[in-house]
Image: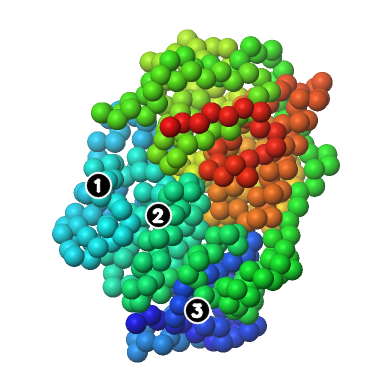
Amino acid sequence: MKVAVNLLSPKLYYSTIAIDNPSAPVTVGADMTAFIGPNGAGKSLLADILEKGWNFRTNRISCSASSKPVIRKIQFSDIHSLAGLKVEYYQQRYEATANDEVPTVSEVMADKLQTERARELCEIFNLYEAADKKINFLSSGELRKLLIIYTLLADNIDMLILDNPYIGLDREAREVLDSALAELNRKGDLTIVMIVANERDIHPDCTTVVPVRDMQILPPMSRADFMADSELIDSLFDFKINLNDVPLPPVADTARLNHVVKMTDVTIAYGKRTIVDRLNWLIEPGQHWALAGRNGSGKSTLLSLLTADNPKAYSQNVSLFDRRRGSGESIWEVKSRVAMISPELSLHFHPAGTVETIVAQSLNNTNGLFHPLSAEQLELARQWLARLGLTDLAGRTWATLSAGERQMVLLARVMIKQPRLIILDEPFHGLDRGRMKAIRALIDYIADRALRSPDEAPVSMIVVSHYAEQLPSSITHKLTLK
């Protein structure tokens, strides 16, 4: 029987942060429910309260069951909670001997795979084909499926909360996850709650929608009523970026280049699996490329050759900024001319300091506090935080940010540099509809300004997205991996 949770307090707390609940009591569950709202609205906080906020004396929470239900929240970064996993840094998956102790899916699941429940879940989520893959080589879709199965088998769960489950998934993987969640929902013994930042991510079987805005829980609505209320939806996602006087690149890299990227007959294989096969790719200054392909097609591996993160670049015919890799350039020379955002990078991003210093350290090509920051660098970071609506986060630490807030901070780290090559791998990962539109406009603005300005060298871009409608209008070329 599905469990329902009643939020009775007019104000609910998790740690020292509060969210208002003026419509109390609010009931969550009994049927599939979605929390929806813009980034930073309080959705993840509400999920934390449901999972771990029952013992706060300020929170009055009841449920339909006779005892406190078992509630678990899953988010993409939960890969680090998997048993036996030793993935400590982003580049590890590309290093030959660094993955020896990283377990496969079968090893993580161990004897759990022998149970009838495990076999049922693996069948529902179609995970058998990934059984022999090491965890850090899973695609986004495979990782999400594994995390759900692993969590459901770990406890006798009454309520499963999925934080932005669709981000980074191609259409096929999304349909598989949709179907699997529908099957779980139909079985009737699990309450599913989803945290989403876009109305198109509300599951078709969801019956109740709980809007969240400005740290306030709005009255629950039926899915049909919410989808019909365009005025409410537009107000939830009303966000714009002022494109007047966008700061210029802090370093004037005006060197004349013949090419930014040149790959000739590049082949990348791991074991018996060929990831990239005899690829030729030329990116000239000022070109803006869309990189497409299904989950697992090799996009992340290909991009790692361009960021000095994959040592296999040295054994291939790969040139960056008119210099072949391995001809004497340092990785820091490469990184000074490249800025990148990606789901994998975010997953292994553990920066020190506050949001303000995290953004400013991008100018030193680092994540930590390894180099002292100048007053000018900190001021530029503050300018970009203000431009992206992140000023209120300046003094916060990385661990306190929601997934959407983290993505905006990572985008700020890219924009503050504006180097010769900008790589945006799923740049809208976890962003709400308003911020997605605003960031797309900012990307177009920077691409166009660099082409028009006599003081700037042309910026080259690579943008990865599974959805053509999300691509910036400044895209000029496309490469699709099979």
Closer to us: mark 2 or mark 3? 2
Q: Against 458, is 233 above or below?
A: below
| 2 or 3: tag closer to the N-terminus | 3
Q: Say which quarter of the image contains residue 237.
A: bottom right
Q: Say which quarter of the image contains residue 97.
A: top left
Instruction: Judge by depth and name the residue closer to the eye, 131 or 229.
Output: 229
Instruction: State the CA–CA distance, disc 2 to disc 3.
Output: 25 Å
Q: What residue type is labelled 3?
A: Val
- Identify the image quadrant of the N terminus: bottom left
Q: Work out whether residue 323 can be spotted.
A: yes
Residue at image position (30%, 33%) is 98
Instruction: Judge by depth and name the residue closer to the eye, 465 or 12.
Output: 465
Q: What residue type is labelled 1?
A: Ala
Q: Against 375, is 131 above or below?
A: below
Q: Work out whether residue 45 can be spotted.
A: no
Residue 83 left/right relative to 329: left
The residue wearing badge 3 is: 28
Circle 1 SS class: loop
Q: Which amino acid does label 2 sit on?
A: Val
Q: Please state the horizontal and vertical placement of residue 120, each as a whole percent of the image.
A: 25, 63
Q: Please state the horizontal and vertical placement of residue 146, each as a whole percent of the image.
A: 33, 54
The residue wearing badge 2 is: 176
Circle 3 SS class: strand
Closer to us: mark 1 or mark 2? 2
Residue 134 left/right relative to 357: left
Q: Against 356, is 25 above or below?
A: below
- Identify the image quadrant of the C terminus: top left
Instruction: State the CA–CA distance, disc 3 to disc 1.
Output: 35 Å
Circle on res. 131: 1
